[in-house]
Image (cartoon, rainbow, N blue to C red):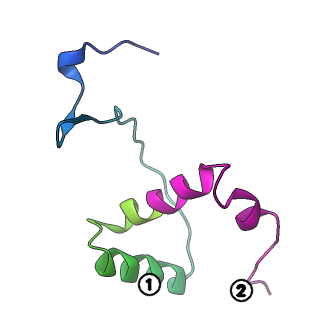
Amino acid sequence: MGFVALGEIPMEGGHAMAVKDKAMFTVELEKHQMAFLEEMMQHYDIPDTSKALRVLITYAMDPETERDRIFSDVRCFDCE
């Protein structure tokens, strides 16, 4: 991990933001799943569906929130 000089940390509203380390991935979704992301994007004024998906993943990554509730039960609305 490299170091960033304080002057190089992106600022938003006077607060330091995390340095981004994004990469492009292809994710296969059902059409209704993509429609859900698009709906949430518009409803909550999220810039794009990629950001909407990142919001969901970030929420799921926090062990203090819903991680067990999200992943302990298998929910498959599209299983054959």
In the rendered image, residue 46, in percent from the top left (x then y), is placed at 30, 68
What residue sits 22% from the left and 32% below the top?
A: 10
- Where residue 11 appears, x then y in whole percent? 19, 34
Residue at 44% from the left image edge and 84% from the top image edge: 35
Disc 2 residue type (three-letter): Phe
The residues tagged by marks 2 and 1 sit, at their Cα atoms, a distance apart of 15 Å
Magenta stretch: includes residue 58:
yes
Dot 2 or dot 1, earlier in sequence: 1
Is residue 36 magenta-colored?
A: no
Numbered label tally: 2
- Identify the magenta region: 54-80
Q: Is residue 76 placed above or below 61 in the rendered structure?
A: below
Residue nearer the viewer, 16 or 42 = 16
Q: Amino acid at mark 1?
A: Ala
Q: Viewed as shown, does residue 75 lie left or right of 50?
A: right
Pick the quarter of the image with the C terminus: bottom right
Q: Which mark is residue 75?
A: none
- Judge left or right: residue 38 versus residue 80: left
Kindly state the secondary structure of the residue where label 2 is placed: loop
Q: To which residue does mark 2 refer? A: 77
Q: Residue at x 76, y 78 (%)?
A: 75
39 with respect to 25 (left or right) = left
The image quadrant that residue 49 belongs to is bottom left
Query: Along the line of sight, which residue is nearer the eye, 66 or 33?
Result: 66
Q: Above or below — where is 53 with respect to 76?
A: above
| Residue displayed at 32% across by 81% down | 43
Q: Determine which residue is flagged by label 1.
A: 35
Badge 2: residue crowd in 10 Å (few <14, some 14–19, many ≥20): few
- Vertical position of residue 31 compared to residue 17: above or below: below
**Image quadrant of residue 44?**
bottom left
Percent x, y of residue 41: 34, 74
